[in-house]
Amino acid sequence: LAEKKPRVVFVLGGPGSGKGTQCANIVEHFHYTHLSAGDLLRAEIKSGSENGTMIQNMIKEGKIVPSEVTIKLLQKAMLESDNDKFLIDGFPRNEENRAAFEAVTKIEPEFVLFFNCPEEEMEKRLLSRNQGREDDNIETIRKRFNVFLKSSLPVIEHYKAKEKVREIEAAKPIGEVFEAVKVVFTPKAE
Ligand code: UP5
Ligand code: MG
């Protein structure tokens, strides 16, 4: 995979901050390939893989699936793609995820897109999503918020120290959020 020299942007933010929604917009305008770690894990459950039950239980509890499982899925998806530009959505979720991904793939992200959104707005969005996700109930949502604060924010801090974080105010209408996202992805004229 390292020989392919993929260009990677990590797309991070709390549950319901709009990662998936904005990734769809970025794909359309900037020709990235979108890899949602959560979608890959949910597909793994559906495929009846031997890890399926374990993954399903962890998602129901809002817990972070062991990094080797998630990294394998991400690596496979990048290898199978003809593209060399990837949005990795919802990963890494803790420092261990981050360090393992770097060690295994030798890939450093170009930057990290961070959707910053207040919890009450994220909660409102998740409770009205209605897509049948097993983790969109108030008990699991609270657990997901706690894991985000405790485990995922430190990853964002790590990349802030490296000046790699591009932070977006995510509590606005979808189109306004995308206007801010566009600025991040549009090369600056010298
Ligand atoms: N919506 C979006 N933008 C809006 C806006 N600006 N204004 C109003 N509404 C807006 O959006 C959520 C909802 O809000 C949608 O209905 C949308 O229309 C609306 P979405 O774009 O789906 O938000 P997103 O940030 O993608 O929310 P998601 O629920 O997918 O985030 P999570 O991070 O919680 O979920 P993910 O799928 O990444 O992970 C799920 C679980 O998988 C984790 O909890 C964990 O258990 C497991 N997991 C791992 O273990 N490891 C991983 O690496 C990844 C996941
Ligand atoms: Mg999502």
Image (cartoon, rainbow, N blue to C red):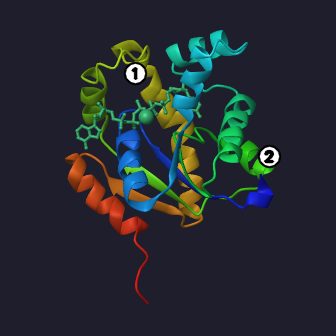
Relative side of 107 to 173, left or right: right
Crowd rating for badge 2 (residues with CA inside 10 Å; few <14, some 14–19, many 20+):
some
Tag 1 residue:
142
**Type of amino acid at the residue the image marks with label 1:** Arg
Quarter of the image where one finds residue 178? bottom left
Residue sitting at x 42%, y 66%: 185
**Disc 1 on helix, strand or loop?**
helix
Relative side of 42 to 101, left or right: left
Residue sitting at x 42%, y 29%: 145
Locate the C terminus by quadrant: bottom left
Residue situated in front as seen by the camera: 145 or 101: 101
Depicted 9 relative to depicted 65: above or below:
below
Tag 2 residue:
104
Residue sitting at x 70%, y 15%: 51
Q: CA distance from mark 1 to mark 2?
A: 32 Å
Q: Is residue 63 visible?
A: no
